[in-house]
Image (cartoon, coloured by chain):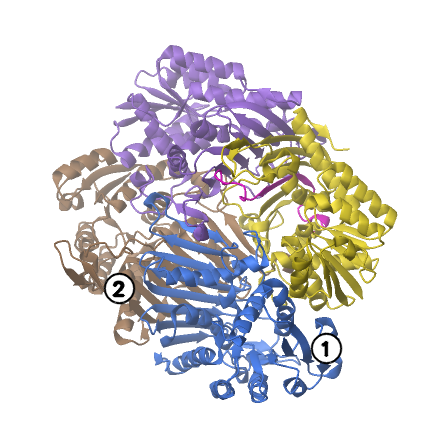
Chain colours: A purple, B brown, C blue, D yellow
Amino acid sequence: MIGVGLIGTGFMGKCHALAWNSVGTVFGDVPRIKLVHLGEANDELAQRKGREFGFEKASGDWRAVVNDPEVDIVSVTSPNQFHPEMAIAALQAGKHVWCEKPMAPALAESQAMTEAARQSRKVAVLGYNYIQSPAFRHIRQLLDEKIIGDVNLVRIEMDEDFMADPDALFFWKHEAASGYGALDDFAVHPLSLISKLFGRVSRVMCDMAKPYADRQVAGGGRRAVETYDIASVLMRLENGIAGTLLVNRSAWGRKGRIAVQIFGSKGSIVFDQERFNELQLYVTSDRATEQGYRTILIAPHHKPYDRFIPAPGHGLGFNDLKIIECRELISKLEGKPAHIIDFDEGFEIERTVHAMADSFAKSAWVDVR
Amino acid sequence: MIGVGLIGTGFMGKCHALAWNSVGTVFGDVPRIKLVHLGEANDELAQRKGREFGFEKASGDWRAVVNDPEVDIVSVTSPNQFHPEMAIAALQAGKHVWCEKPMAPALAESQAMTEAARQSRKVAVLGYNYIQSPAFRHIRQLLDEKIIGDVNLVRIEMDEDFMADPDALFFWKHEAASGYGALDDFAVHPLSLISKLFGRVSRVMCDMAKPYADRQVAGGGRRAVETYDIASVLMRLENGIAGTLLVNRSAWGRKGRIAVQIFGSKGSIVFDQERFNELQLYVTSDRATEQGYRTILIAPHHKPYDRFIPAPGHGLGFNDLKIIECRELISKLEGKPAHIIDFDEGFEIERTVHAMADSFAKSAWVDVR
Amino acid sequence: MIGVGLIGTGFMGKCHALAWNSVGTVFGDVPRIKLVHLGEANDELAQRKGREFGFEKASGDWRAVVNDPEVDIVSVTSPNQFHPEMAIAALQAGKHVWCEKPMAPALAESQAMTEAARQSRKVAVLGYNYIQSPAFRHIRQLLDEKIIGDVNLVRIEMDEDFMADPDALFFWKHEAASGYGALDDFAVHPLSLISKLFGRVSRVMCDMAKPYADRQVAGGGRRAVETYDIASVLMRLENGIAGTLLVNRSAWGRKGRIAVQIFGSKGSIVFDQERFNELQLYVTSDRATEQGYRTILIAPHHKPYDRFIPAPGHGLGFNDLKIIECRELISKLEGKPAHIIDFDEGFEIERTVHAMADSFAKSAWVDVR
Amino acid sequence: MIGVGLIGTGFMGKCHALAWNSVGTVFGDVPRIKLVHLGEANDELAQRKGREFGFEKASGDWRAVVNDPEVDIVSVTSPNQFHPEMAIAALQAGKHVWCEKPMAPALAESQAMTEAARQSRKVAVLGYNYIQSPAFRHIRQLLDEKIIGDVNLVRIEMDEDFMADPDALFFWKHEAASGYGALDDFAVHPLSLISKLFGRVSRVMCDMAKPYADRQVAGGGRRAVETYDIASVLMRLENGIAGTLLVNRSAWGRKGRIAVQIFGSKGSIVFDQERFNELQLYVTSDRATEQGYRTILIAPHHKPYDRFIPAPGHGLGFNDLKIIECRELISKLEGKPAHIIDFDEGFEIERTVHAMADSFAKSAWVDVR
């Protein structure tokens, strides 16, 4: 039996609740999950969401969740700036922690979380769900098997358009206090993919840009935008692979694009999160006249798709990735190997992001470590 | 509070369980769902699946589910030939019924189910989940708004490859006793889409074919295949629209293809279930030099995608469609308008399939009614 | 040296002129081509086009072209109804003939042309250029090699939207005198592909439809449309393969779509003329976890692409297909094997189209021969 | 009448010959083209190609072409290192010059060519044919009309796989004497597109990489590779737009990819040369629920496609782009506005490439001018 606490009921809070709700039905071989305690900003919201999500208790004080003796693990899905305090409190209260990414706005806070996790000897993992898709996991297997030979280049783009409208009002994400911009919002996702496929980034050279210099303020007048919606990065990985990472949160038409291109000595792999039930593979072992990118539809033999659907090509959804992540988390709780990003690995990802920002500030290549 | 009974724990049984489990968390505004009683072929399996799926009771006799006084509605997900007996028993026991499609192998049985439903005055609906996808629902809205003008032609193909291997052994689906072949397996799905978009089919002209005349038998020797993996149908709808319906369950490379093409006087719509988070729209209202099929990614404004994910383009999965269907079913239980296929509408679909088979037998056009 | 006569300077006339102009430069190993005599509806137009196209002589009387002793072969690209008279006259004058498809509006006329060709013992071929694309030719080779095993089903659609506008005025193509409609305009193209890949059609069952019952007349008022923009056909080929042929010349959004799907016992092939520099191949010889449609870009090893461009994936154009056709025609003139459709084969194609129309009139299956 | 001289009969030589051969037939409104004199490396080859291509004279000495009084313009399609000498000689002999890109291996040579062109007052243009595609020309028009608002980011990738095979032998392109690598081979193409759409590049930051450190030598043993198959560049344009340029000539699976993404304040444009008869447009003026990338097929209203084919979506080929370029060149000869890249503009492109290489050498941002 696993007693679950949940803090936050927004996009990711609901996603965690769905995962905890479904992981047993999907996978079967997991302990019984008990939805114990839900925390939100106030009692009324907590009560309502507790009912909707099926939690036994609900309270307007997150500390009640963290300190609930029936709670074994706390899902932290609050806004990023609250992650450090909540995650550290939970760890210190002897709970396991499943925290949404990124860890924290400042690198020092991420480091504090990582240290708290080490000292607690509890499971402390991050919500990097894109690494869980069967297509991505199959890419990892293809690379392990050297199906495309030795990789020499990886290019990743991540683009959305939620900040693309120049007429949208100035809001907190345009303030420097919120971070660098697209770099914080997006770069950790592609870096989680790189981390799982290739390991650490060695050096970075970053440029950033603002599509719109200023924006209208709610009350009237205009205010200079302080964050960068666009970041473009040249990279070298520790294993010598060359790479580029291009992100843009003002990219009209892109909704959830994470476009990956991996080139090797015997083939290449192309993937786009907007069609994450497919992957493209080109191999030179095909006869020359029939070489071409194969569009592989995800099927039961691409684990753990089979736990959801026994027929090929029917498609998983974004929320299903969190269910898989939850299964991996449970494996980790059980002391088994788990395909998941813990605080140690997450900290390296965040260190890389800060190195990128540093590179831009210095207009020079920066070593990550 | 809704007390749920579930019969069957295969592909669709699990899918129903996941839907009942998640519908509250996803939609919020639904009564509390109580997973009361699960029925399977034997006690051991029932107990195990009951635990995995979170049901309170479990038994090896489906009648125990149907007669459980705590059960308000029964999900019937057993093999097709058991649908009539189970659904009718449940209706007669005063339960609502949510039965997987198709209703039954024989038309007379479907008719009996339909009559039992009418007499019971209970909610009796079918599991046609493809009509629930936000993209499909948006197509319906586009047609209602006459965005592509008056429709004059609809073409639908449904293809998979689970029977494409000529070296696979003869099994029960190759026997005439199992039905006509692809016509039963597949045609009801496209017909459910047609029913929701355009209404009833008027006349049909059908051809059927067998890719493989005989197959190896498990014990040795070969046996003639009695069912048809391929069916191709010319149609006229009651509203005058011309159409074609092409199905193939031996179509190598196709996994869950339901390819729809709708042509109207001011544009056209193209959709493929293999990429069901997208739809293609061509409209003549665009400037001539910029006319082209738009690939529209499903987003929160395509209801009820927003209940799952607040960000566009992140993708629903096949199992999510069943959650939406469950929400529609609950609307129907609540006496509200519901986008769902009840036994009456389902019976018309099955009547159309049988008319197709009849047309092939007669080698002539056949009126559906 | 080949002396060329050309009748007609419209879409196809220009296309022939370009082919005659370029075939030597592209292929190298052909006799010298001399553009001798161009014929058009009047002297002025003939003179102007003669200059533009580089012909030595030009005249407003097509018989001057046909009877010019310097002319060895006559390209007939005039409107269809003039084909029989011109082609027969040319053959009788001892010229080879390269006539655009279709042969003639009436089957009897096509037959007369075919007989004239036989008697003349001259080369008499038709302008079915879609069979010339390297991708199509590669499909033929893949089938010959049994890469997808034994074919059991072929589906072809041909759609354009040049008659899709309901507000366009009534014109001659809406009159019954112009033929059946989409069947004449389009069906010969897919049938040419079928002829080259699979041979003859055995039986057909055809339905036809009119998207728009009447249209505005130039002078005022409305007039009933007499031809059918939509035709849908069930087919059986002589070799037993099942098939469908669906055509629509009012299909908004489709510009030059000829979508081919070929299913076999070991794979499938998908092709669309709108992207005719690509083909899709699915084979079961790939490892299961990596099976998927390959998008094969046409490259120098797909002959005769190499004669145009030595680098892969750069793309041929529609007009290049006519240059390849011209090369094949020259092979035939030289007495060598040629991948081209002569009057005999073309007559079988037209017989099939007329059988389709007959089937629709009778509302029944019709044997082609 | 234009008297044409051609030097070189390889990939581009043939392409020029085809263009000169067809430009009159395609466009009609051009002076008569006379194929006067062809030059190749020796008399035998010159004679043979002269016959194939339809030239009146042919010689093994290119100076005979340059000095032929009947020649008005010289197409220079020899290997790059010969461009300066030949182009300058032709200009000094009073001929117009149509030279293939890039101008020359060394920037000083390009500069010498540019100065020779200025002094000659003759037309001197470069063979940047990708700017001629109707889709690209339409992109330019869309930008001029501000259909996607103000552009803030452009990303271009150019990838092919002709050097991707690690088992291919060491050859001259692996020697430093041949240039930098992919930067010379590819970067000029994307830069030509940028030049026509946005103007000049201001600053660059470049990284380069070698997929394979060494290669087998023909006679035995291995030799270190001295050139870089991969280059990745951060850019700023003079007008403030941010950009990236990524090239790779060892990119397995890519054949002629030039993938362009242009993001603006009101939409975005996506284009890939591998499907250059299409372009993708996303605009925010569409209703929110129907926004999506439109796949626009090139049609007669995208000039000058109509001069080749009167029907939409039938597709131009790579060689057709050179015919359009030839028409633009003729406009320039006629003193009319021409969409073409002359030596001045070409020199700026080459200056940018050399700045990229310089940036890599210095590991720092470099100003182009």
Q: Which residue is mark 1?
A: C56
Viewer-closest of A196 and B49: A196
x and y percent of residue A71 in the render?
Answer: 32, 19
Q: Which residue is mark 2?
A: B228
Q: Amino acid at mark 1?
A: Glu
Evaluate whether residue C129 shows in this view: yes
**Range shown magenta:** D142-168
Q: Residue at x 67, y 75 (%)?
A: C35
Examine the structure image and report whether residue D158 is included in the region drawn in magenta: yes
Image side of residue A150 versus residue C242, left or right: right
Viewer-closest of B352 and C338: C338
Q: Chain of mark 2?
A: B
Viewer-closest of A75 and B187: B187
The local secondary structure at tag 2 comes to loop
- Vertical side of C78 occupied by C146: above or below: above
Q: Residues within 10 Å of mark 2 (few under 14, many from 20)?
A: many
